Image (tube, grey):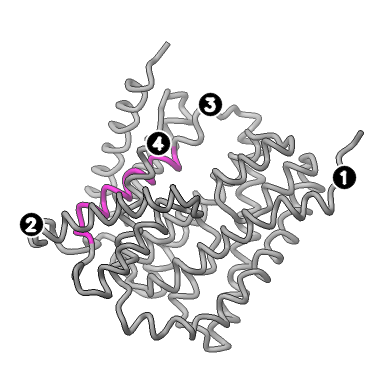
Amino acid sequence: MTSTYTKRAATIGIGAIGVFAFWALGLPLPFLLGPMFFCLLAALGGAKMQDFGKLGFAFRTILGVAAGSSITPDVVQALPGMALSLLTVPVFILATAVTSYPLLRRLFRFDPVTSYYSAMPGGLQDLIVFGEAAGANLRVLSLIHATRVLCIVSIAPLVLNLWWDVDLTAPPGMPGIETPPLQIALMVFAGLAGWWGANRLNILGASIIGPMILTAALSISGIITQRPPAEMIWASQFVIGIGVGAKYVGVTWSELQRVVVAGVLNAGLLAGVSAVFIAAAVAMSLSPVLDAFLAFLPGGQGEMVVLAIIAGADLTYVVLHHVLRIALVVVGAPLFLQVFHKPQK
């Protein structure tokens, strides 16, 4: 039997080939999309791969640090102005669920519990835990959400490039050699300590939220004065890209025909719902169109933070909307299921 370490080493190698291929061809986001697509193709080809598991969350702390370092006293003063925009997030969740559930339940005929949790625009790990407890089909659930993230993360960069002319091949920060070692040490401390503290307090999305809060405190106090260097952001992108692609390991042809197709159609519907809310946010002057675009796309929290960093969007605005979306789904999804779905006896 292939060991976990061997599979992980193979996955890293495949991801690295993806980075070099995208870089050589001048394709966008080589450290994110390169590993993601090459691991996806390898998984569909039957390769035995393994993502970074819990170690992957350590790399997500970099994104929390990047978000926290962008919070300055001026940003803090602007937070109350985001309240009205944040109030639209529950409506957004309801709209996505109402749109997705009929597609998955009636057209693809997944069972009610699987359809319900597959329609929720939340974090994959949390939804798998809740879905397993409720009796959902975990394979279907994980593939539909992985496909949602894959589609959103694949299409969003193209829109950023075509609409806003964002250079998706540019470094996402200063080189590490130009960043003072003390600043890098402080960022590493803020990332790991913030993650540990948030885990101890059972805070949702601890690997991003904890580092963001601690880094924000150090940024506002003037202790941390820079964002993570490009190499740290690239490392985080690489691990996230591998994680998305490797989720397709073991996918069969029948699953491709039914489940992945369902995931693609579901992602398309959700993109349409997102477009309505993005347009509404801009029309109501709640935010610039770039910030609204990244805040209301139902991608993974980590993936959307990466895109916000690359695009130069308001990280605080984007992160708060995704955190609230995931928090409301985590808290509300099990409660609504108990109210509206009565298990068969």
Label of residue 39 in the image:
4
Structural distance between the alpha carbons of marks 1 and 4? 40 Å
What's under tag 2, amino acid-wise?
A: Ile
Label of residue 250 in the image:
3
Residue 298 lies in quadrant: bottom right
In the displayed structure, 209 sits above or below 118; it is: below
In the displayed structure, 323 sits above or below 192; it is: below
| Residue 46 located left or right of residue 315 | right
Task: Categorize mark 2 by other alpha carbons within 10 Å: few (<14), some (14-19), many (20+).
Answer: few
Residue at horizontal 46%, vertical 55%?
153
Q: Which residues are magenta?
A: 228-245
What's under tag 3, amino acid-wise?
A: Gly
Task: Categorize mark 4 by other alpha carbons within 10 Å: few (<14), some (14-19), many (20+).
Answer: many
Q: Secondary structure at mark 4?
A: helix
Label of residue 342 in the image:
1
Instruction: Identify the residue position indicated by label 2 in the image.
Output: 177
